Amino acid sequence: MRVNETVTWQQWTGWEPRTGASLANMHQTAVLFGGRNEFNNVTNDLSLYDEEHGWYTPSKWSEAPRARSGHGIAVSGPYMYMFGGKDENDTILNDFWQLQLITTPGNPLFQAVWRQLNLANLPPARALHGMYAVGEVIFITCGISSTGTSLKDTWVINTGTAVCKEVLSAPSARVALAAVALDCDQSSCGSSPVQIAVYGGLPFGQQFDLFTPGRAHDLLSSYLWDLFPLAVLLLAMLPFLVCVVFRRLCQKRTVRHSFAEL
């Protein structure tokens, strides 16, 4: 949006009162999930809105995530990803889900396909955190932990390689923050720095922070460095392995020669 453009707000007819819910844009459709309703019940409802059909509840092709509020969501490509939150028992969660909206012939309304991604080394459980996507990389930062402490870490989840990793750069500890990636779109984020804007949160007094975890392609390629110690070890053992294989071949040749002489 350019500075000289006029911003116009338009109020939609609401679905039902919610707090702690998430709202995303998928295929020009507003996607509302979870949160607490006016009766203080935690829900796992999925509701969609577009101007042609209004609000509706999509049919589900798979089991939905458990009810929660204060979770994080991010859209990457055709998928919405969800992490963490707090369930109806106030348990802080660390499950990771993928949502895909599909259509079938003769039915213009979207249908929901949920899939839980049981990845290794997922971030610690949290709620009221920041979550955003840069290309196929999902960033998760800060939030409240399962022990009630404010977190000050940042994690990346590469949805293409299914690898999770904590990065060193992070804002100050806070919960209930707003966060977004700046100066990086789908076409340029591979070569430009990934700059994250974080605003507000608790405790009050935290204002506007900018931090740079790195370039998107550096974050993706950095996973290869995790294998570097193993590669060095294998390289150091290579002469020993060659000697062992050579000795075994020589022993087999000697045995065959001995049998031939008999």
Image (cartoon, grey):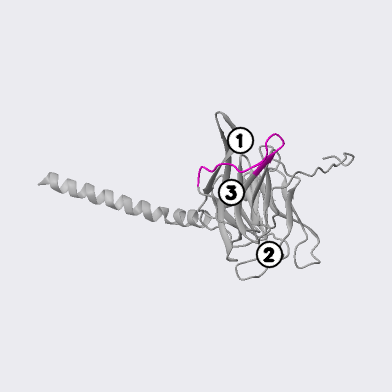
Q: Nearer the viewer, residue 242 or 209?
A: 209
Q: Residue furthest front?
A: 39
Q: Which mark is first along the chain, 1 or 2?
A: 1
Question: Is residue 256 rendered magenta in the image?
Answer: no
Query: Which circle, 2 or 1, is nearer the viewer?
Result: 1
What secondary structure is found at the residue carrying circle 2?
loop
Looking at the image, is mark 1 or mark 3 nearer the viewer? 1
Residue at x-position 63% and y-position 43%: 76
**Which residue is tagged 3?**
158
Q: Which mark is residue 152?
A: 2
**Picture coordinates of residue 212, whole percent (x, y):** 72, 54
**If you read the primary sequence from the N terminus, does the residue marked by circle 1 or circle 3 appear first?**
1
Using the numbered discs, state the Cα–Cα distance from disc 3 to disc 2 in whole angstroms: 20 Å
Q: Is residue 225 visible?
A: no
Which span of residues is magenta-colored? 48-62
Which amino acid type corresponds to the residue marked 3 in the rendered image?
Asn
Q: CA distance from mark 1 to mark 3?
A: 30 Å
Q: Are marks 2 and 1 in contact (CB under 8 Å)?
A: no
The answer to whether residue 257 is seen in the rendering is yes
Q: Residue furthest left?
A: 262
The residue furthest top is: 106
Three-letter residue code for mark 2: Lys
User: Looking at the picture, which amino acid does disc 1 mark?
Assistant: Leu
Specify whether 61 is left or right of 37: left
Mark 1 surroundings: few (<14), some (14-19) or many (≥20) residues within 10 A = some
> Residue at label 1?
109
Q: Secondary structure beneath disc 3?
A: strand
Q: Depth check: give the residue in front, 201 or 39.
A: 39
Where's residue 10, x and y in %?
81, 42
> Left or right: where does residue 71 sit relative to residue 228?
right
Q: First in sequence: mark 3 or mark 2? A: 2
